[in-house]
Image (cartoon, rainbow, N blue to C red):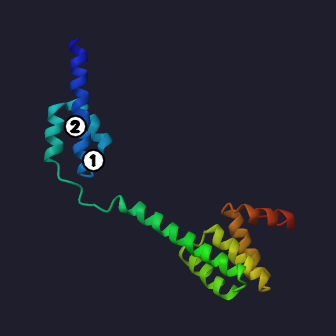
Amino acid sequence: MVILIVFIVCLMCGFICSSIASNKNLGGCLWFFIGFITGIFGIIIVLLAPPDKNENAGDASKQIIEIKKDFFNEIRLGISLIKENRLSDALVIFDSVIDSDPQNSAARYCRAVIKNKMGDYGSALTDLIVAAQGGHIKAREILNKKGVAY
């Protein structure tokens, strides 16, 4: 019975440490174990620990998501311009996306389509190969039908 009470107290100390550490951006999982093992001393230590100064640590992943959304919107706009046969305008958009993200397989595939329509077959093939290497399924299918290794 005493062991069960000690275990429950240790769990509570672990959860309290984890909660405090998470609020200070210190990483709750590690602090759970510190609190579990050291009990009340872990709680005191985490209370005295300064908060992480890097408040933007979680913002980096949000920024990446925003960039990917921007690329997605740019690609959608470029595709609509291709459908309207505004190839030069679409090419500018895809060039911009590729300048920012050279391995963007969707942009590479779309730029290959444009260059093919414009008669620039060598550049179209290069973009198609890069798109296929990046995992673009349609690019792979086209190259496989043509017998081109990528």
Q: Which residue reaches farthest bottom?
A: 88
- Which amino acid lies under the numbered mark 1 shown in the image of this protein? Ser
Q: On the rendered structure, is 113 left or right of 146?
A: left
Nearest the eye: 5 or 78 = 78
Mark number for residue 22?
1
The residue drawn where x is 70% and y is 71% is 109
Instruction: Tell me the quarter of the picture where residue 13 sits.
Output: top left
Name the amino acid, label 2.
Ile
Of residues 147 and 73, which is closer to you in this image?
A: 73
Residue at figure coordinates x 72%, y 79% from the top left: 83
Q: Quadrant of the C terminus?
A: bottom right
Graded by Cα atoms within 10 Å as few (under 14), some (14 to 19) or many (20 or more), the crowding at tag 1 reads some
Q: Is residue 53 left or right of residue 78?
A: left
Front residue of 89/46: it is 89
- State how far apart marks 2 and 1 are (Cα): 10 Å
Rendered image: mark on residue 97: none
Looking at the rendered structure, the secondary structure element under dot 1 is helix
Q: Residue at x 18, y 30 (%)?
A: 39
Closer to the camera in the image, 69 or 5: 69
Work out which quarter of the rendered image holds the N terminus and state it.
top left
Quarter of the image for residue 92 reads bottom right
Q: Which mark is residue 16?
A: 2
Residue 96, given in percent of the width and then of the height, sits at: 57, 80
Residue 33 at x, y = what percent?
Answer: 28, 35
Extreme residue in the top direction? 1
Q: Secondary structure at mark 2?
A: helix
